């Protein structure tokens, strides 16, 4: 299976076989504590081999047989094209010259794929002396030609310090009985040169490694220590997880409040400012689980009690953003442009990491996770896990699927405001809605090394609508074919943009706005807002808000202004209908056509849901067929897409604000999964009312649930609620009970006072940041300063 970095650690380092019988000390693996620690390097290397190949499995099992066939086909093609001639100048013709970092990095990855096949029973290359000899020779050739201690680190540092040494160490684990001692010594020396420890960036020794990069390096150093029988090296790898060197400052087992790592609210950030749970976060989780399993029960077992942070991250950070086994694109960063790493494959990597971590986690946690995973795996028939998994991953997944005592958990529901990474996820039983926001704290996009060339507007309020009956929406050729100027939920001008990230290295763009985020109430409702400030070269400004309710998402826009002489649009929907989709479009009950509707009140897309325009609005619709290539959005050295044309059909709904609008606005409602009849009824009855939509406040009222939600851009009054300054406020009345949630997503104030339009007698429960002055005109004073935009809650009684 030819996978890039960004999927290689899922394939090569994120899984284990169920044959492992020991887990991290201090967990439910009591037996491991009772036995003598494993001090045998060879025993742990055998375990590493099992982690790479899956160990013993039933070749008659059709899933394992299919996995072997897939591995056989991929490795066989690489074997056939491997240049084994005496006068070769590269190992593969398409990876020449070998001295290019991207080329030798990918060459090692391909050699590992062949080595895994050689070490796996049932493949055509299994146990072949010819293959082993050729692999030993290829490793020597790569060392002599390109990757050796005296080489100067150039280009992308990752290939030198993580990609190549990890694949090289894996090859050495698999081939160690065939490697000459002198060759192994050379390979350990090159790792000592470019990845001597997991604590520092070798090409920048003052730069500490953080997050996923630290995990990657810890695995490399551990394998190097085992192969070289160096106990201190193995210990240093273990200690790097906790960052013993710097007193835990960059520990993976701690919550951070800035920069890279896991946050207590479930956010995960890498590269200081990118929401990256689904890419780097998965690599971190998988790598940590791999190392925990590798060293379990040994003299170097991880005993840091704060490993519990990693366990908590499963349900805080990953479960909310995994939908039936796929990983939400809003947290995959530039990985959205990688043809071989779609949401299903990155989701499968997360599933595998969770299952591996479960082998050593406390029993109650492991049980919950396996139940969640079983639910994901049984519901995802679009891209089954068994079609994506490696053999080690299959072993863990099949054990869960076969265990009748494990009951599949239903879909996760709830509202999650990830204030520390500017993401909002709202989940209902049949659908989910995710908002991708940005601010001066969190980037609007990341691009670089030829990746994510058209990601300009992915952080400008892009709204992802996930449907349990359509798991292929963003995985089926969406990114190479969607109009990148018309991403759902965004307000954009129409100026042509240059490709991003065409040079070496990665870069991000953080807009200057402060407001991005919101508040959640009762774990069920949320309100979010973002002040849109156009990228350099655009004077576009807008105030956008979303209200995420039981069966409804209300989107409001106000103050839309631009003086650049270009049309400005707000995109309601841009639905991928697949290669042959002919989903019916209705507008106000009549068959939809391409063009403009001057006073449309509602629309409906068959199989998707309804769209309501309260009070009517000028709606534009377009049904079109779009063709693109993955290469047009990703030219990366090891991630670059193919030039094969991809064609998909789309239905786009948008509002045209005209050229250089002044103080324009919009209001639309998403009704996911609703029928056309239900959409028409909703439009007529309007159970959710828009109460304000201007530069001071945006507000809605849901009479069915007793909920009123407001985002205040400034001090003011809306829906009878007052605020002394900017804030997001949700208030829900149920009989005499009142629930309140308040946040300051702009992080500009120290306190905000919220006035309620009804009497309150007392507070029954509240965060210590909330004080109540009861009475006929009650006031809540909320200390929002220093809370980083998180929600403050109170329960009151009338």
Image (cartoon, helix red, strand yellow):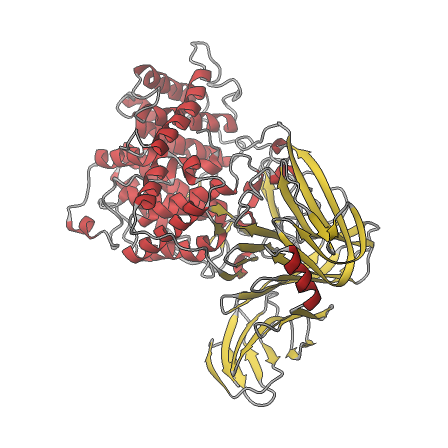
Q: Measured from the top left, where is residue 231 in percent x and y? A: 25, 40
Q: Would you say 284 lies left or right of 553 here?
A: left
Hey, which quadrant is residue 164 in on the image?
top left
Q: Measured from the top left, where is residue 188 in percent x and y? A: 34, 30
Q: Would you say 339 lies left or right of 361 here?
A: right
Hey, which quadrant is residue 170 in on the image?
top left
Nearer-the-camera pick, 371 or 497: 371
User: Looking at the image, which residue is at 44% across and 48% down?
Assistant: 211
Number of numbered tags placed on the structure image = 0
- Locate the N terminus by quadrant: top left
Hey, which quadrant is residue 339 in on the image?
top right
Nearer-the-camera pick, 328 or 186: 328
In the displayed structure, 92 sits above or below 690; it is above
Q: Measured from the top left, where is residue 167 in percent x and y? A: 40, 31
User: Looking at the image, which residue is at 34% across and 44% down?
Assistant: 401
Q: Would you say 742 lies left or right of 683 here?
A: left
User: Looking at the image, which residue is at 72% across and 42% down?
Assistant: 623
Q: Would you say 263 lies left or right of 650 here?
A: left
Nearer-the-camera pick, 75 or 144: 75
Please say whether residue 731 is visible from this viewpoint. Answer: yes
Please say whether residue 712 is visible from this viewpoint. Answer: no
Q: Measured from the top left, where is residue 780 in percent x and y? A: 56, 81
In the displayed structure, 177 sits above or below 762; it is above
Outermost residue, top side: 86
């Amino acid at each position: 299976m030819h996978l890039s970095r960004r999927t290689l650690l899922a394939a090569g380092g994120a899984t284990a076989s169920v044959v492992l019988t020991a887990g991290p000390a201090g967990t439910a693996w009591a037996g491991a504590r009772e036995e003598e620690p494993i001090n045998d390097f060879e025993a742990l290397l055998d375990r590493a081999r099992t982690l790479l190949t899956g160990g013993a499995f039933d070749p008659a099992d059709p899933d394992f047989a299919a996995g072997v066939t897939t591995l056989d086909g991929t490795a066989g093609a690489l074997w056939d094209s491997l240049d084994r001639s005496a006068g070769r100048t590269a190992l593969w013709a398409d990876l020449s010259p070998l001295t290019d970092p991207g080329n030798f990095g990918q060459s090692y990855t391909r050699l590992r794929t062949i080595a895994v096949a050689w070490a796996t029973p049932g493949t055509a290359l299994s146990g072949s002396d010819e293959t082993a000899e050729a692999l030993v020779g290829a490793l020597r050739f790569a060392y002599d030609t390109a990757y050796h201690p005296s080489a100067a680190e150039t280009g992308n540092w990752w290939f030198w310090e993580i990609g190549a040494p990890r694949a090289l160490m894996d090859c050495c684990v698999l081939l160690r009985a065939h490697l000459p001692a002198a060759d192994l010594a050379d390979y350990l020396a090159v790792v000592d040169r470019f990845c001597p420890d997991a604590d520092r960036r070798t090409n920048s020794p003052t730069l500490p490694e953080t997050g996923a990069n630290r995990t990657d390096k810890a695995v490399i150093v551990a394998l190097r220590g085992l192969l070289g029988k160096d106990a201190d090296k193995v210990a240093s790898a273990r200690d790097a997880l906790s960052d013993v060197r710097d007193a835990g400052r960059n520990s993976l087992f701690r919550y951070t409040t800035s920069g890279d790592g896991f946050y207590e609210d479930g956010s995960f950030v890498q590269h200081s400012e990118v929401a990256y749970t689904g890419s780097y976060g998965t690599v971190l989780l998988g790598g940590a689980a791999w190392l925990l399993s590798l060293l379990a029960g040994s003299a170097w077992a991880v005993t840091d009690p704060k490993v519990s942070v990693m366990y908590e991250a499963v349900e805080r950070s990953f479960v909310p953003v995994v939908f039936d086994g796929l990983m939400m694109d809003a947290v995959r960063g530039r990985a959205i442009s990688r043809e071989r790493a779609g949401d299903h494959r990155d989701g499968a990597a997360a599933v595998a990491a969770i299952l591996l971590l479960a082998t050593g986690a406390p029993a109650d946690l492991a049980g919950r996770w396996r139940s969640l995973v079983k639910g994901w795996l049984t519901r995802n028939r679009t891209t089954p896990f068994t079609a994506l998994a490696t053999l080690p991953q299959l072993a863990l997944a099949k054990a869960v699927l076969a265990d009748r005592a494990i009951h599949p958990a239903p879909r996760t529901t709830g509202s999650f405001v990830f204030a520390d990474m500017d993401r909002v996820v709202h989940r209902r039983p049949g659908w989910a809605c995710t908002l991708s926001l940005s601010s001066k704290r969190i980037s609007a996009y990341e691009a670089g090394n030829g990746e994510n060339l058209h990601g300009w507007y992915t952080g400008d309020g892009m709204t992802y609508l996930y449907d349990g009956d359509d798991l292929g929406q963003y995985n089926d050729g969406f990114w190479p074919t969607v109009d990148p100027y018309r991403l759902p939920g965004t307000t954009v001008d129409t100026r042509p943009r240059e490709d991003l990230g065409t040079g070496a290295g990665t870069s991000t763009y953080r807009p200057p706005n402060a407001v991005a985020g919101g508040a959640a109430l009762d774990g069920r409702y949320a309100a979010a807002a973002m002040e849109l400030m156009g990228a350099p070269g655009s004077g576009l400004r807008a105030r956008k808000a979303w209200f995420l309710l039981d069966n409804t998402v209300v989107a409001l826009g106000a103050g839309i202004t631009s003086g650049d002489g270009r049309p400005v649009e707000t995109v309601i929907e841009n639905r991928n209908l697949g290669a042959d989709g002919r989903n019916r479009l209705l507008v106000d009950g009549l068959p939809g056509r391409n063009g403009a509707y001057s006073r449309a009140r509602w629309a409906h897309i068959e199989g998707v849901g309804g769209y309501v325009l309260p009070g009517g609005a000028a709606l534009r619709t377009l049904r079109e067929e779009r063709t693109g290539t993955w290469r047009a959005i990703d030219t990366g050295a090891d991630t670059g897409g193919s030039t094969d044309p991809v064609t998909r059909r789309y239905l786009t709904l948008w509002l045209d604000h005209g050229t250089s609008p002044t103080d324009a606005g919009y209001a639309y409602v998403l009704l996911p999964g609703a029928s056309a009849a239900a959409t028409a009824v909703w439009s007529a009855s309007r159970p959710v009312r828009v109460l304000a939509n201007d530069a001071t406040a945006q507000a809605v009222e849901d009479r069915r649930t007793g909920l009123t939600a407001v985002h205040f851009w400034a001090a003011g009054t809306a829906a009878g609620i007052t605020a002394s300054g900017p804030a997001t406020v949700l208030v829900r009345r149920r009989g005499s009970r009142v629930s309140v949630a308040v946040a300051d997503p702009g992080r500009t104030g120290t306190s905000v006072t919220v006035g309620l339009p009804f009497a309150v007698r007392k507070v029954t429960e509240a965060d210590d940041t909330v004080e109540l002055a009861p009475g006929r005109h009650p006031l809540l004073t909320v200390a929002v300063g220093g809370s980083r935009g998180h929600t403050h809650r109170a329960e009151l009684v009338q």
